[in-house]
Image (cartoon, coloured by chain):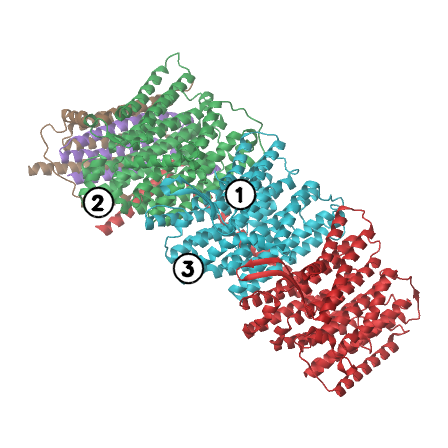
Amino acid sequence: MSNEFIALAVPALLLLSAIFILLFGFSTHYTKNRGYFITLTTLFIAFILSANGVGQKYSIVILPDIFNSMIVYDTFSATFISLFLLGGFLTLAIAKSFVDKTNFFTHESFVLLLFSLFGMVILSMANELLTAFIALEIASMSVYILVGLNKNSLKASEAFFKYLLLGSFSASFYLLGLMLIYAQAKSTNLDVIAEYILRTELHSQLLIVAGSMLIMITIMFKIAAVPFGAWVLDVYEGASLPITAYMAGVFKIAVFAFTLRVFLKDYITFEAVYDPLIIGGALVTMFVGSLLAVIQKSVKKMLAASSVVHSGYILIAFASIGEATSSAASAIMFYLFAYFISAIGAFGVLSYISKGSDKLINYDDLDGLAKTRPMIAASLTIFMLSLAGFPSTIGFIGKFYILTSAIEAGYTFLAFFGVLSAFISIYYYFKVIAHLYFKEAGHVEVHYGYKVSLAFIVLSAVVVLWGGVGTSLLLDIPGINALNELSRYSIESLGL
Amino acid sequence: MRSLALQNEILFAILALVAIVSSIVMISAHRPIDSALSFIVTLISVAALFALVNATFLFVVQIIIYAGAILSLILFIIMFLNIKDENLPDEKHKNRWLFAISIIIAPFSAILIDLIMRSDIAVHGVVREGFGTIKDVGLTLFSKWVLPFELVSILLLVALVGAVTLSKRSE
Amino acid sequence: MLKSYMILSILLFSIGVVGLISRRNIIVIYMSIELLLNAVNLSLIAISADLADSSAQVISLVIIAIAASEAALFMSLFVVLFRNRASLDANLFDMLGNKNER
Amino acid sequence: MSVLSAIIFIPIFAAIFLFFVNLHITLVKIVYMLATLTVAYLAVRLYIDFDASSSMQFIEQHAWITQYGIKYHVGVDGVSLGIVMMNALLMPLVAIALYKQRDKRGYWINLLFVQGGIMGAVLALDLMLFYLFWELMLLPIFFMIGLFGYGKSNFISMKFNMYTIFGSLMMLISILYMAVEHKEQFGFYSFALDELKNITLTTSESLLVFSGFMIAFGIKIPIFPFHTWLSDTYRSAPMGIVIVMSALMAKLGTYAIWRFLFTLLNETSQELAPYFIWLGLFGLIYFGISAISQTHLKRMFALSSASHLSLIVVGFYIYSNYGLIGSSYFIVAHALSSAAMFLMVAMMYERVQTYTIESLGGIAKVAPLFALFFAFFALSIVGVPLTAGFVAEVLIILGAFEYNTAIGFFAATSLLIPMLFMFKTISKVLYGETNEKTKNFQDLRAHELLAVIPLALLILAMGIFPNYFIKKIEPTAKAFVDKKEAVYYE
Amino acid sequence: MSDNLLLTLFLLSPFLSAALIFLINLLFKNAKQSVYTFLALSGSGISAILALYISYHSYFEKQIFSSHLFTWLNIGDFTIEVALKADALSSFMILFVAPVSFLIHIYATGYMNRDASYGRFFAYFNLFIFFMFLLVLADNPIIMFIGWEGVGLTSYALIGFYFGDIQNTYAGNKAFIVNRVGDFGFLSALMLLFLSIPSGGFGFSNIFLNLAEIEPFTLSLIAFLLFVGAMGKSAQIPLFVWLPDAMAGPTPVSALIHAATMVTAGVYMVARFAPLYNMAPEVSLFIAYIGGISALFAALIATKQYDIKKILAYSTMSQLGFMFMALGVGAYSTALFHMFTHAFFKGLLFMAAGAIIVAFHHKQDIRDLRGIKFPKIFVMMAVASLTITAIPPFSAFFSKDAIMGALYASGHIELFAMAFISSLLTAFYMSRMMFVLFFSKSEQAAKESPKSMFYPMMLLTLLSVFAGLLNMPELFGGNLNFSHWLNLADKFYTIPHAKEWALMSVNTFFIALVIYNTYKKYAYTNEIIVEKNYGWVTNKFYIDEFYNKTVVVLLHKFSIFFDKKISNFLIDEKINLTALAYLKLGKIVSIAENGNVRFYALYMLIGVVSGFVYLYLLLGSVL
């Protein structure tokens, strides 16, 4: 299979499947289960397809004549695409009970999920600002709607409202930025812009600097960096758990995928200009995020707030990209993977035990789970440890790379603050563990069913552990080294 | 030629003034219907500004889609929801807010304007015949921008699906 | 001429932002967002004219399409919100947030 | 897999096995005993095979995270051998003594886990590997306190956790900093102890790196003023973990100072040594005096441990043959004594359900064997002659006097201070009239004797024939002192 | 018999007997008393016989026994051998320690008869002897220190022997803790000494060879610190407080440990380090003064005591003061000779007191024991009392007189005066005790003591009377055999015989006078009942109270201060507060998170504007 084929086949598959379900949904033969399995199968096939493209180093401009070099398929995008698809697959697989128990999860939901994945796929391949924007909008709008799916729920509607309003607001900043860049560079293609920047002096790049700044603001909004991320707690709270998992685990990574590309191609020349801003953003984000996470009473909101903190960590690596390009960039890749699998797992567990109800999972709801459901509790513990960056989990390795790259870039103090917020994060993550294990069960034993969901949760937990200690010494399964290689290839395929 | 340029500038000044004033009225009017009406004025003056620089196709699109479709939609919604005056939010501190936010945003605008003034972005390209016509735009669209065009269609589909999903009464 | 257009566009954009934040009426807020997009379009057209290249016009065409899709979503939002609360006051929708945590 | 890896991983795998396989509690205990006894056997073999004429041996190395030069790199030398032995010996003994008291699977799983963690941390020669185990051993302690602790165990386990992780994270930054420096100076990342020591740091850098490490170790030990987690944690923790903490984990902190700080930042350590010696001496006296007014047995012994650990820190920082050998000997001696002492306290608690000193008395009358061992272990903590602690204290004090007479005198107060509380405790607990609680005090049972007798014999053997044991440490100490001289004369 | 075996057997026989008794006691609850008796007596008996054998050879053949058991420690230069050596001094020590302890063992079999803890008692007892022997025979100071500490430890166990009464245990604690203060000094001294000795091992001989290389200040410091150790063990001011309390133990314990053996360890140690002390004259003088003050002080307190054992305890302290005075002026063998005689008569006094105590159902107050009728005991006690008051020709007359003579001759007349007054006070309190006990109108009869108690006392009576002959001064035709045997670095003071005669006579005369006066005061009167029993002397000058206030209470206060104020309040509280403050800050921040979407947009706007302001400032500086 040629890579070019994969690059076209994956989005096409997603699109076709989406449209098929959309139409099929009106048929009487449609049942929720069928829709569910069609979606799962699509995602699985697409994942297998895209995973094929992972592991070698290449970079192909897709149909340059037709698409005018607007999308590029390289290891970088292949890796991310596989991640999205895997993420979508895992979210859906774990959320079986949610899909079954709720009546608002109609066939349109599957369609929107597939559309949003389609948007992300394009986003990760986009090499042009407008294409990226539209892809981002496709993904965002699908997610907006997914958030507001449960229109009987006031909370969901409110979350939808906030997300949509602020999202549109931030999108207009992106467009303003795009306009300014276009005004100066006369192009929206990343390569052309990069070439323009290299060619000219700073005083004829003023609008590019300002425009990039505006685009960065949109990105900051999407990754919920402070002060642009005020929405995140509310929206995560209002959305149903699988959707939250999807947003935290998949959508955020998609944004980062695009960000990383833009950064490595264009921003890197303005590194001196943006570094202080990103550093400031990282510090504020980590600080405020951990403040918010500490006071939350519900696990879901805590995870939401902590996802802000994780954005802060990634910003650290972004700040270090200029000085320690390759290590920082691959650190981001690795960290994203680490965060992705841990967050999907954590939210997945929550959605598994919430059984589709829209109630918040409070800390108290976890009491005594270790007694009744040891495997679930153990998995959740592992996810928490990973999010907290505890050694022997993948989260630690991710944090390790990020901190190393920060120190390598000379930002030791930034690493120090990162560590400090990791320290604070210990509190709220371990609080979950404490509730799981130390409190007496407040409720009677519940039968959750859905062995498949459980299996995927446990599988994610195993991956988290293996990503923390895995070595080819022990078993012939790719471990940390392989992941590392992968992220390095991805970064190198960007042609740096 | 000079007189044409001058004429253009005068026209621009008038249209700009109309656009700004009407947009200010739009954001400060109490009743949404007033806002919508003044917004139409803004949109039309913007459309006129399009026309001023030969973007005839976009002028038409602006009038049809914005002033026509979207604004009608807004008006329709306002009517449809039958929002009465007493249902409107009681915005006691509206003017304070407007003032405060204007102050806050002033540096942003000032900086951007300053940056624009400083940069030498204008290339004064020579406008060829038929520039901005539907043919011209269409050729560009289907030669260079096929992908965004296709993607936008998907975006619209998404919005459509979403609007239907959300608006239909749940069974 | 280009710079005048851009300055006007920045001014309109700012006015849009002011309206977006200051107003409680969601419909006005929505119109402010549309104003933002329009402001961007204005500049793009001017750039296009200056460059004598219709690419920027295509971009603004796309932006108009995006605005249309946003419009669709906002319309359904109005419906949903009004159905829930019988009001379009942005301030009323603050059920989420940290009030209950304090 | 070499013997060291086996020692590290047998308990960990046993723990994982027990976690996944839901066995009956008796079987759990049997598996526990099998695993720990295997480890003990391997450790004894290790001790016998240990070549007393060289320092680091049994080295095993594998690549782990290649891009960052992180290796699985373990080895044992004279100083770590002691901790390995203690860890291997104490675990089965603890189980023998306590097996009737604990019928929860988690208890034994966590103990196994912590054993593996400590083994790994002691044997690791790669900083990342060390960090991994250093953190890993924390987890079972957290669980143990939370699950089986007393009082506000929830809060206390969290507090303990936060304290120690704070230290670890500071250390992490230091480790990373050194690795990056290594890359900048030699072109590749490395976390190996013997490669990282080659890097050169400016004074302020090395000070910062040093403090990162020192905070971690200082909290674990604990040294003043990082000690405030101590007494609550000890009071709340279940006995198995108290023994692990006082006998092994705290020692690991002092050991790590020597192993890592002195190797990596030799010059800085030597420059700062006087401050830490004084801090240690202050801790010795401070904790000792704090212990006097304690009414809770575990708290008291916690402070007493802290006091002695401060002395061990002093011994290491003296930077001499005597200090080092004394301290490493003291690590072992104190591990034995404090573990035994806490075992006795655990047995006592099982019988009287109280830890309050005031509510006890007259046990010697009804339970002579218990009294005998209690008093013996208490005295061995005080360091009376013929016990192991005496030898160690003499060596440390000798080193202290060699360093500076005034410091010598302060170090020698370790003869006095523990007595002040220990004798009061012995009197109050064992002597006097029996009361309601103690009048039916059952004497030691066979399995309890089985646990404490080896400890007592070992303490005596190490006190009477220290030379046999010290010979294993000496080459390590010699290598260390030679290195110190080298730095000194450069 | 080889030296090795001989010394090992000598050392180990008490140890083995102790260990066996211990095991039997723990394992067989109902073991017969006779088993213990046999083991205990054979243990100490063997060592007594061996002691006599060793001393015989040492005395007559100047033989030095030495034995090397194993290497205790060997780190570089630091080599400590477990080596035993019986030179003249050690032989002299075991000459009286082993037999006296054997006698006290025999006595104890009677005294402790049918005691529930009979076995345990003898286990401790023999263990004590073991440590004492180790102390005496050690060939290097570290091993000596081990014995030294071991002696203290067993003494602790024996004082608190009857632990049912917690006060006894406290007395034991006090003894051990105070002793440890001394040990602190001792060990510090050893460390300094070790570091000052260049190389060649840490045996005594090597130490003394290298003394010249130690710088004077360090030497003085070492000497002083060693003496601190001696102070603790030999109950000298200021570390004497434990000795009176130590009388809580059974009387044989008092006889053996707190009269004959352990308390003399300090004297032995100073004598052992005689070469060192000769090089530190100022410390020696200090020792003499401490000895003098202790002697006087203890004698003064003894005059107002009523507990028969306490009187004897203070008298012990006082006599030890005499010995230290002698040591201080360099008359080492004189001091040791007094120690020798003291072992006998003080042992005897305690045993007699013990007999009385047993006979009168553990009454110890002499006011309750007035006019007891106990002829044999009376005779023996009278002999012992006369000996201690230095009435010729009893043994202590010679030893004490030699001390007085040495003090006088050394030129420190103030020391002599202190010694003189103390000896008068000794005469007073001893005769007071005797007269109150035996000369009274009221008469109480008592049963006879068992033979096992009686015969050892008999033997000691004889020894008290005649032991003086062994070191007769020239004045009486003797030739100071002991001094020659010991061959210590004595400073020999010679004073004219006339003066010596005069001293003796005056001394004896005054003592006689005091005894006469005491007789008038106490014999057949109620003086003892009516005399005032309050005031400074009766209350031992409030020294205990003083220590209690300053040391014990202060330490406790410090402890609470450290624990509560510093650890809890200053550190822990602050850390907790920081955490709380963080939480509070979180709550404050969450006010911003108020759920109103317009505010969220406002935050975004603020972010945008501040970003642009930053950008503009930066670009402004660039452009």
Which quadrant of the view contains residue D311?
Answer: bottom right
Mark 2, chain letter? Answer: B
Asked if A387 appears above or below E102 in the picture, the reply is above
Chain identifier of the brown chain: B
* Label 3 crowd bin: few (<14), some (14–19), many (20+), radius 10 Å: few
Q: Quadrant of the N terminus of chain C?
A: top left
Chain identifier of the cyan chain: D
Real-space Cα distance between discs 3 and 1? Answer: 42 Å
Asked if A128 appears above or below E132 in the picture, the reply is above
Chain identifier of the purple chain: C
- Would you name the residue on which mark 1 appears? D158
**Viewer-nearest of discs 2 and 1:** 1
- Chain A tint in image: green
Depth check, front residue: B87 or A437: A437
* Label 1 crowd bin: few (<14), some (14–19), many (20+), radius 10 Å: many
Depth check, front residue: E378 or E558: E378
